[in-house]
Amino acid sequence: MAEQPSLTDLARLGFVELGEAREVVASLGVDASLFAAAASPDRALSWFQRIGDSNPTLHEILHGDVVLRDSLIRVVGASDGIAEFLLRCPQALERLRVPHSLLSETEFRQVFDDCDSVDSIRRRYREELVTVAAWDLAGESATANVAAVAAALADLAAGVLDAALRLVIATTEAPDEVRDNTFLSIIGMGKAGARELNYVSDVDVIFVSDSTLFEDDHRSLELATKWARGVVAAVNEPGIEPPLWELDANLRPEGAKGALVRTLESHIAYYERWAENWEFQALLKARPMAGDAELGSRYLAAVESFVWSSSSRDGFVESVQRMRERVTANIPVSDRDNQIKLGPGGLRDVEFTVQLLQLVHGKDDETVRTRDTLTSIGRLAAGGYVGRAEAQSFADHYRSLRVLEHRVQLLGLRRTHLMPTDETMLRTVARASGIALTSVELLARWSDIKRDVRSLHERLFYRPLLATVASLSDDTLALSREQAQDRLRASGFRDPAGALRHIAALTAGLSRTSSIHRNLLPVLLHWMSEGADPDGGLAAFRNVSESLGDSPWFLRMLRDSAGAAQRLSVVLSASRFVALLIERVPDAVAWLDDDELMQPRALSEMQEEFGAIDARHDSVTEAATAVRFARRRELLRLALGAVLGLVTIEQLGVALSDLTTATLGALLKLARRDIDGIEFAVIAMGRYGGEELGFSSDADVLWVFRDSGAGDEAHKHAERIVHDVVRLAEDLRFPLEIDAGLRPEGKNGPLIRSLDAYRAYYEKWSDVWETQALIRGRAVTGDAQLLDDFEAMADSVRYATSIGDDGIREIRRIKARVENERMPHGHDPNRHTKLGRGSLSDVEWLVQLLQLKHATAVPALRTPSTLGALTAATTAGLVSAADASALRAAWLFASRIRSAITLFTGKGSDILPVNHTELDGVARILEYVPGSGAALENDYLRTTRLARQVFERLFFPA
Amino acid sequence: MDKQQEFVLRTIEERGVKFVRLWFTDVTGTLKNVALAPAEVEGAFAEGLGVDGSSIEGLTRVYEADVLLHPDPTTFQVLPWRGQVDPTARMFCDITTPDGQPAVTDPRQVLRRTLAKAADKGFTFYTHPEIEFYLFKDNNPHNIVPVDEAGYFDNVPGGTAHDFRRNAVRHLEDLGISVEFSHHEAGPGQNEIDLRYADALTTADNIQTFRTVVKEAAIEQGVYATFMPKPLVDQPGSGMHTHMSLFEGEANAFFDPSKPHQLSTVGRQFIAGILTHAPEFTAVTNQFVNSYKRLWGGGEAPPFITWGHNNTSALVRVPMYKPGKEQSVRIEYRGLDAAANPYLAYSVLLAAGLKGIDEGYELPPEAEGDIANLTSMERRALGYKPLPESLHRALHAMEESELVAETLGEQVFTYFIRNKMAEWNEYRRQVTPFELDANFRQL
């Protein structure tokens, strides 16, 4: 009997519950130091006691058989799951003897030879699992053994499937002729297919059948399906010996809803006609696991070509991007940081990168067509597609993560990929993995691994591209130009040669800038590749970078603020409009760090700033240049907010209108420097009046003046002001088009009138369309009293009396005529976002007609805002809620598309693009997933068709 | 180049094929073809074949003139009727835009999309059409003379029709299209050939092939075949009754031994979907002015929205169940005519049926007896509503249909209505022989 250990001794041995341990040790009369080898000495001790107590003869064995005893302590100290099994089946204790090496693939099949029932197969599986775990936990280094363990687990699972299928075939009744001519092969997919299975995970399979029956192969298929169901039941269904793991056949054609078993021809036909790209990528791991081997190899031969041609198929880039999104999007936030498999820097990241590289380069190089992750990393390195050093650290990390996953699963023999949060559990995992001794150390080590894995995708995938065109100080492997271009193409660059030129320019030389670029570009390229226009993004980045040159803050920001660098890559590859502006206002890059700085600024704030420019400059020309620059800067702020989704389309309309007001106000001040004796004001009309401007809308205005001493000169003065404001506003790159076409008599009328002249005109002559236009009139800038007086005059025209039947008829007639005349030729009228079917103008005309009819009686309708008036009309019961919502949806959709078109292409257009690249870019700005151009098109056409139905019913009642 | 494509190139060499025809279908259902020399096929596989789409009905938006045809190598067949002189082969094509996106206006694409929706719910859609057509002595529309005077199932010994049917059936079998029955129909010169059950995309391809085969086989006999819905005022029109079923994996989703007529709840809801939406999709299943002459011309055509067990006067018939044949429990839509675009017609029928399943529509009571013999008051009392009476009314009903818009996609939907409205307007302008006969002398 060993000496009674002190509590300190026990603590040194790794016990946690010291007092309790001392009692048990004393009562059992064992040497406490034996338990130091266990991941959790406490658990090991407690299980040791329970198992021994369950059967008195076991005590003898455990005390006598040193080898068995030590193995037991290691296994039950790391796995409650296996301990429970041993308690249930004490005869399995024998299986704890650690073999010299694990069984081979064939041997694992043979261990099931004498199993004649589902229960016996399951029990045999668990017995073998005990041996695998014993071997695993006895090893010197868990990371060195992890590949062998994972392969053994896959082979063991294959043995189960083989045995289960044999059993099911023997016990299913069928005519001899059918049975003898029916063949079933079980194809392993995922980790089972790649022989890299976990202790407990779903085993993914596909069932393939074939028949040599003459003609009626339907009976064969029925029988094969029965067999497959039998196999699934043998693994999954409740029984005396509990089920093993989830046998999952959902990767089959048509997924869970498709037939469980298909013939080989039917599989091929499906992959030829229906399959989506990711399904080919899943086939990368396919391997015959059980059942008819000859059929299995025919299946494999048939599907192989699909896998390796997938990277040259249309939509490959999109499908890879979606695959990546699926990976990151499906994790509950609460689990994110504890996920060994799916979280950032998890196993899935490694697997994703390796598979992507295999798909890109395996097209031409058969040596990288391997299934399991570790072999594939080795082959990619040997083939020169990833650097030796990176491959080594990638493989090391993968091994460590897999060991952690294995240890976590061993704990309860449960399928989990979550790191425990409980302190003692963490400690057990740490000690069982051999990666760390304490929980703190484990978490630190794991977080290093995660960080490193996160950046490895960029290092492996993009960094070698740099080495192709630049000399890097380290020994990063250099790809050939063709290989580099293949990779760029697979990431979505349309002009890989051009992209390489930009990369070369950015990384050339010895300056600090280029050395920072060499470090940053891999990750920037990665972010750009996720945008709609990676090529444009890279070119714009080069421009910005060249104009900001060595500004220390820029380089510091790129280097230190991951958020800002990422946003820069995102906005540049999403929006040509932003790229163009940012080249001219590069300092704005600094805002990217701070959402607040990309919010629209208040009108008063802008008016103050823009107004102050006047005082700072003697020269009007210089002052105007400063105003225009300030406008570009604010325009960029709004564009950034819009691309990043920080402002809504309604906020944007108001903000752009405010910006126009501030700009016109400042220019007006400059134009009036040497003019006295008149009052002057600007009236916003149209969408400007409604505060609904888009990035490329014209600003509709009316100009108005009033003599205050200039007498006969007043009109001339006013004309000069108008002339100067228009001239000073001119910006060729980012035009501010001022349009006075909605004035009385249109293009034929005088450009400017006095307030009295307007009043006289509207009282005597006004056409109905002029009254209609005035509904959207909003006095915005100029002399305060004149602004007020104009509004009062306008109210008396637009709201004083309701429009009569003649007026209504006239408006309907004009609308019907305009629909024909103003539509540009050669365009599909349904795609015109302004004049097309159910688009902006339909909604606006309808709303304005309601205002002309009812604003006299319903004061809430007196607003220049389209949606504001529509809401008021709904509240007043003039439009049903359903109709209003159809109209509102179309109006908003058309407005958002117009804004997105300008943002993506850099120039305004009224037409929904037909070019698929543009359509895709516009769709992405509208937050569709990549590759959804056709969906956007269909959604838009549908929304506007429904709005048009409402419009026709309400505007042109039958 | 995949294995199928290599197989095609090899076969072209081995069989000495001189021309390869690329087949595709426009929105109106007309089969189009482009002939290639054998040397050009490889390029067509690799990059597709560019054609000017603006000349093809509804295929492109006006401003986007070019489309690419991608031959589907699994549909490669040597055409039998060209004989051994200049062997000619054909392949069906999928159509894409120049940047590789599936053309939204390709009818084949519309059907693929609808089938994919069914697959999402776990269903495969099988169809089996009975196609009727007339044989006339020549192709002069102003003097149409049927080739014979026989009637239903009549055996016409040694007649033209007999040889014709033998040739046509042989050609079809040579093209890998299995034929179920071929017999003489009710009208003089009228024939019917039934195609075997297949998934709806294969069936639609087969129908397109079938029409060509029939016309070619007729020419070989020196006669003319037409699928016009109603060529003769006093004789029955040519329908394309289609039997339909849904399968879930290997199981017939329409079969349930415990229910009346062995028709499952899914089957009943599918019928209810079709009946509910029939007025909306009739413009697609009956797409010509002339189609409505068949629907409302009496005889076997069913103009009232009803269903019945083995009732040949109902719009949807549930055929008699034969014990042990659960795989063949099915329903038959009798409204379809022989000139429909099969891709679009099967799309709308399937979509309507699925809608019935999704929404759990209730099936009205079944119709018994001959509906045509009821008075209009009786029909009203029983709640039997009519199908649209003309193309014009059908188009108006379609315009209001979200189901049809969603199924065809916005662009095909809009084009279809515009195109057919133009046909209606042109028709309305006509002064017909009927008016001249009735009015010219009298007024």
Image: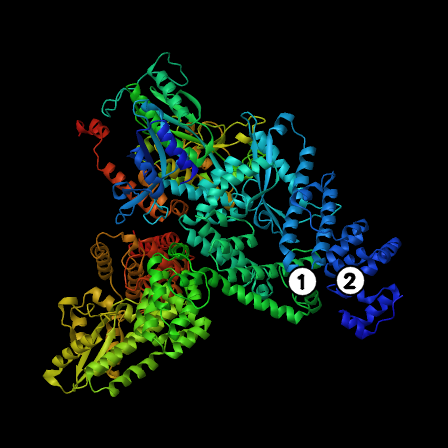
The kind of residue tagged 1 is Ser
Give above or below for A804 relative to A213.
Answer: below
Q: Residue at x 36, y 68 (%)?
A: A506
Name the spot of residue A241 as percent of width and height, x first: 75, 47
Give above or below for A228 relative to A605.
Answer: above
Give above or below for A742 relative to B134.
Answer: below
Q: Quadrant of residue A700?
A: bottom left
A429 left or right, relative to A838 = right
Residue lying furthest left: A712
Q: Residue at x 59, y 62 (%)?
A: A339
The kind of residue tagged 2 is Ala
Give above or below for A618 relative to B224.
Answer: below
Residue lying furthest top: B157
Mark number displayed over residue A958: none
Whether residue A875 is visible, yes or no, is yes
Q: In front: A768, or B73?
A: B73
Secondary structure, mark 2, is helix
Q: Residues within 10 Å of mark 1 (few under 14, many from 20)?
A: many
Residue underneath mark 1: A433
Whether residue B296 is visible, yes or no, is no
